[in-house]
Structure formats: C-alpha cells, structure tokens
Amino acid sequence: MATIVMDIIGRLFINVQQVRQMPLLLTPAAPSMPATLRDIEVPRYFREVHVHSGYRPLDQTWSYYLLSLFQRHNETVNTWTHLLGFLVFLLSLCCLAETVDFVGDPHAWPLLVLVVSAMGYSGCSATAHLLGSKSELCHHLFFFMDYIGVAQYQYGSAVVHYYYAVEESWHARVAGVFMPAAVLLSCLSCLGCCYGKFCSYSLPTWVRRVGQVTPSALAYAWDTSPVFQRLLRWSAEDDEVALYFHLGQAVLFLSSAFFFTYPLPQRWFPGRCDIVGQGHQIFHVLLNLCTLSQIRASHLDYLGRRRLYSRLHGDGEAGLFVGLYVLTVAACVLIAAGMVVKVRRMLDGKAQKCK
Ligand SMILES: *[C@@H]1O[C@H](CO)[C@@H](O)[C@H](O)[C@H]1NC(C)=O
C-alpha cells in the first residue's frame, strides 16, 4: 500500500515539475519582439506586489500585444485560462443547442443568457489581460470592460437560479423584486469595481478591495440565494443530480473568491510565480470550473423541474428577463464609459502637471 502511495506521489511530483517547465516552451513568437522587463523598469502603477519580472513594455503597437499571446510574460497564463474558458463555453453552447430549442422554447432563454454571459466574462477578461498593458488609459479601459463582463455574468447567474433552481417558498417571498434587485446589484458591483480601480492612486489597497468586493459579495449572496436555500433543504431522500452540481459551483466559487482576495501563493514565493502560479490564475481556473458546474446544474434543472418552473414563471417572464439582461449590459457600459471620462480627465491633469 505504502509503495503504491509513494509511487503516486512521485508521479504527481514529476507532473508538477513538467507543468513548471511549461513556460519555457512558450518562446517568443517573433525573435524581434521586445524582451519583458523587471518590475522596477515599469511605472509604479503597473507593478504587482510579489511579481518581480515578466512585465511587457508599454506603448508598443497593438500587434505586439496581440502576438504576445504566444510570448512568455506575467499575463500569458491569465489570458489563456480565460481564452480556453471562452472556447469551452462556446463548445457547451453548441452541444446544448443540439437538444435544447433555444429559439422556440422561451423556457430555455435563461439558460442561453447564462452561457452567453459566461462567454462574455471570459472573453472580456482574456482581452483585458492581453491588451491592458499598452498604456494607463488602456489599462483602465480594458479592465472596466472586464468589470462589465463580471457584472453581466452576475445577472446571468441570477436569472438561471431564479428561473430554474428556485423553490416555491423562496419564490413566493422574492417574486417581483428578485430580478430588479439583481440588475441593481450588477450595476453597483460594476460601479464599485470601476471606482476602485480609478482610485488606485488615492486610496490604500485594502479600502479599494472592500469597495470592490462588498457589492460583488452582496450580488453573489442574493443571486445564489435560491441555490443556497435548496442546498440547505437537501435531505437524504433527494437524489437530484443537479444538487451535486449546485454544491460544486458554490464550493468552487468560494474557493475562487479566496484566491481573488489573497495574493497567494506568490506572497510565499515572491518572484517565483511571475509566469505560472499566481493566485489570480488559480482564481481563473476555479471560476471556469464553477461556471461549467453551474451550466450543468442549470441544464439539469431545465430538464427536470419543468413542471415547477413553468408554473412559477408565467408567459412572457422569460422574454422580460432577456430584456433586463440587455438593460443590465447597457447600464454597465454607460457606467464604465462615465468612468473612462473621469480617468481621461485625471490622466490629462497628471500630464499637465509634468510639463
Ligand atoms: C503584468 O505586467 C503588466 C505590464 O506589462 C502590468 O500592467 C500588470 O499589472 C502585470 N500583471 C501581473 C499579474 O503581474
């Protein structure tokens, strides 16, 4: 027994070693590409604590940043993790479309909104990590776009949980307010995140984090409340497979939030996780898995709870929720645009001072 365990541990270790060598394979796409820099060589604003090297130079051409997808730098893995997530969500949309009538069956629309919103957040995030290093303005612009992605995904989660996962008792309490509140919380978390980034000069990091995390945590608690209520009432007789996937998505989300909040493991190994191993990368992977579990759970609920949800959600409600999704995206775009104007003004002011 002990030898088998040792053997497995030994193999795992070799695999981990291979993963650590991966970045060496990512050689620069073109030999002419500028080399990456150390943290002290980029403006203070762009530095990340505990990440010492792998910074791409600023003010290069767009094609440089696009091609840097194949270069080894501090954002390569952050970009790829969400790019692959995007492709997997696209693939699951295609698979679902083979059996689910997304056009003719209004009860399938919330599921469609979820998968589209998942593609939205992963696509926005991959773009932000790839292109956000061009300049300070671009950094703000693309990360604001990332926050729009997150906010509209919060709405996507709310709509499937409220539509398919909700129990009759919770529905009776929150009907009528649940979705409008979800829209509001999405907008608030978009605003909180954009504002936090905007204030990166004036406020200490922990204050900004609280301003960013509080609205998002509230949104998560509200949007997922139908699932939590169902999980809490889970009894031995229940053998719904969907519940396992709901449990999975909750556990994966909470663990991803941990890695979003704490800069681990790079704090323990400063300078050694510059390319692979940053907590943010772990956050991306866990969030992708959480979304996959959520899509599976929602699909199972869509198949298995039709009697209940078609009674709870009358005609036209699905269409209304699609409309609210479009409204949420539009409102978040406006919020981010307003913040971009503020950033522009601030950066112009800073440039004036330097003259
Ligand atoms: C990576 O470097 C860019 C500058 O090229 C910087 O904007 C970004 O914050 C850094 N990210 C990480 C995770 O170190």
Image (cartoon, helix red, strand yellow):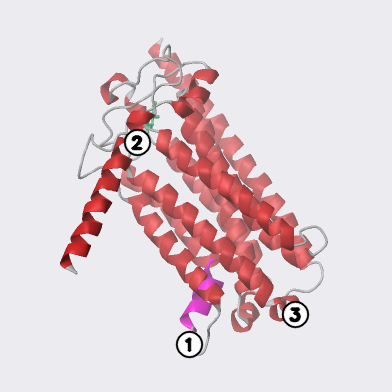
Residue sitting farthest toward the bottom: 237
Camera-side mark, 2 or 1: 2
Quadrant where ligand 1 appears: top left
Label 3 beta carbon within 8 A of ligand 1: no
Q: Is residue 123 visible?
A: yes
Residue type for callout 1: Ser
Q: Position of residue 201 (x, y in %)?
A: 37, 33
Query: Residue farthest to the left?
Result: 2
Q: Find residue 202 and report its image quarter.
A: top left
Q: How far is disc 3 from disc 2 in space, using C-alphas?
A: 52 Å
Q: Residues within 10 Å of mark 2 (few under 14, many from 20)?
A: few
**Depth check, front residue: 355 or 211:** 211
Which residue is labeled 3 in the image? Answer: 311
Q: Nearer the viewer, mark 1 or mark 3?
A: 1
Q: Residue at x 47, y 45 (%)?
A: 193
Q: Which quarter of the rendered picture does the C terminus lie within?
A: top left
Q: Amino acid at mark 2?
A: Met
Q: Which residue is disc 2 drawn over?
A: 22
Query: Residue at 78% of width from left, 74% of height from top?
Result: 314
User: Would you say 177 lies left or right of 154 here?
Assistant: right
Q: Is residue 225 magenta?
A: yes
Dot in front, 3 or 2: 2
* Label 2 secondary element: helix
- Disc 1 or 3, which lies upstream in sequence? 1
Q: Can you give x and y, in whole percent of width and height, for residue 263 in the image?
A: 30, 46
Q: Is 139 within the magenta?
A: no
Q: Which mark is residue 235?
A: 1
